[in-house]
Amino acid sequence: MLRLLATIRKEWLLLLRDRTGLTLLFAMPVVLITVMALIEDAPFRDYQELKFDILTVDNDGGRLGKYIKEGLGQTSQFNVIDSVEGAPVTEQQARSLVNEGNYQICIIIPKGATGAIVSNANKIVNDISRRMGMPENVLPVSNRKDSLHVTVYFDPASKKAFKSAIHQALDNFLTQVETDMLLERIKKQLKRKDAGEENDSMNIQLKAVGLKEQLTGPSQELDVISNSVQHNVPAWSIFAMFFIVIPIAGNMIREREDGSMLRMKLIPGSYLAILAGKMLFFVGVCVVQFYLMMQVGIYLLPLLGLPQLTLGQSFLAAFIVAIGIGLAATSYGILVGTVFKTPNQALNFGAISIVILSAIGGIWIPLEIMPPHMQMIGHLSPLSWGLDAINDIYLRNVGVSHIWGDVGKLVVFAIVLLCIAAGIEKRRLS
């Protein structure tokens, strides 16, 4: 027990003497999280809070164009523009502006589009009336045989997902207009049949089942994940915790070089107590790092105009995950310090390997938007396990019972690395 406490005290004194190491462990992660959250705030708001200008050329002047423009204008994502420099935009001008990248979308509503919809609705009502044996009151139908199309032009640089979303929205507008006009004509035809009754309370509702977004957990917020703070604070906190590899490996190599490691091993008692003391101290440092970064997301980032970090319901689960990440990071540092012989080797390998593991593990960008083969590789990164567990707690509001899978992987990872390090050290001594 005394060996364990003495090791913890030794590591504490070494850390206090290393001002640069303290800065790297605590001040630099704060700066990193703040900068990354500010830089990535705009991309995380894409297609959510940002508004896109849509050029509209209404050659029809009827209900369809009005409905499309009103529908797009009512959303929070689009600014509908039908004039440029005070003059109505022409089709040729709109195509040129979109092709040059000045606008991302242009919608051309053809002449006669509303009339074509009315004619089609009349045709359907006439057919229904004939089949039901209703009094003859034929509604006018156009003889036009060719079909009309609402044309959409996209900026050549537009993303495929963005195009699909616009196509879906416009298709919904067209369907709604045609449905409304059809129902209006059906109601008028039914009123003519019952002309003797002065009852104008007829109400035909086509949509009997609606769409409602519901929460799966106890959280009271929707779309919590869709902001830069919610991703960057936990992600870069884990990244900073794994950078504990640098001071751990550096201390171990210096202890071997100056002979203090050999003197500690010659002291009566198990070397495991010394290793356990080193592990406990640096795991504690990692946990302190983690909670310091969470405070940055809660208090500092909102002062810079960013959203506030949303925490989950289970603080115990977050504490357990922080310990698991700390164990994995500390074990990795011990392995690096055991394998390499000079501080320069350990520093270069440790820093670069953590950057690689963070890149493939979803720290830089969310893992779910990576290509499928990269997602498979990313799930092998211990940083990904830690981030998955934190996201489960903060976003899905799970408790202790749901995190053991990811925590178990982190603990097994730590044990395997410690066993490899022990084997290397034993071979070195023999």
Image (cartoon, rainbow, N blue to C red):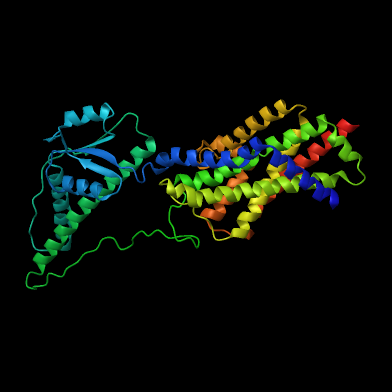
Measured as percent of width and height from the top left, residue 223 is found at 43, 52
When the figure is inspected, residue 335 is found, relative to residue 120, above or below; the finding is: above
Task: Provide residue 8's location: percent of width, then percent of height.
Answer: 77, 47
Does the image show residue 380? Answer: no
Left or right of 340 on screen, residue 159: left
Q: Position of residue 147 (x, y in %)?
A: 19, 39
Residue 125 picture quarter: bottom left
Residue ID at (75%, 40%)? 417
Q: Quadrant of residue 338?
A: top right
For this rendering, which residue is in front, 209 or 142? 209
Most foreground residue, 10 or 118: 10
Total residue callouts: 0
In the displayed structure, would residue 221 be above or below residue 306? below
Q: Is residue 385 something that shows in the picture?
A: yes
Residue at position x 14%, y 50% in the image: 118
Q: In which quarter of the image is the C terminus?
A: top right
- 244 sits to left or right of 268: left
Frontmost residue, 112 versus 7:
7
Q: Is residue 107 above or below residue 177?
A: above
Residue 42 coordinates in the image, percent (x, y): 40, 40
Q: Which residue sits at x=78%, y=41%?
A: 418
Query: In front: 151, or 87?
Result: 87
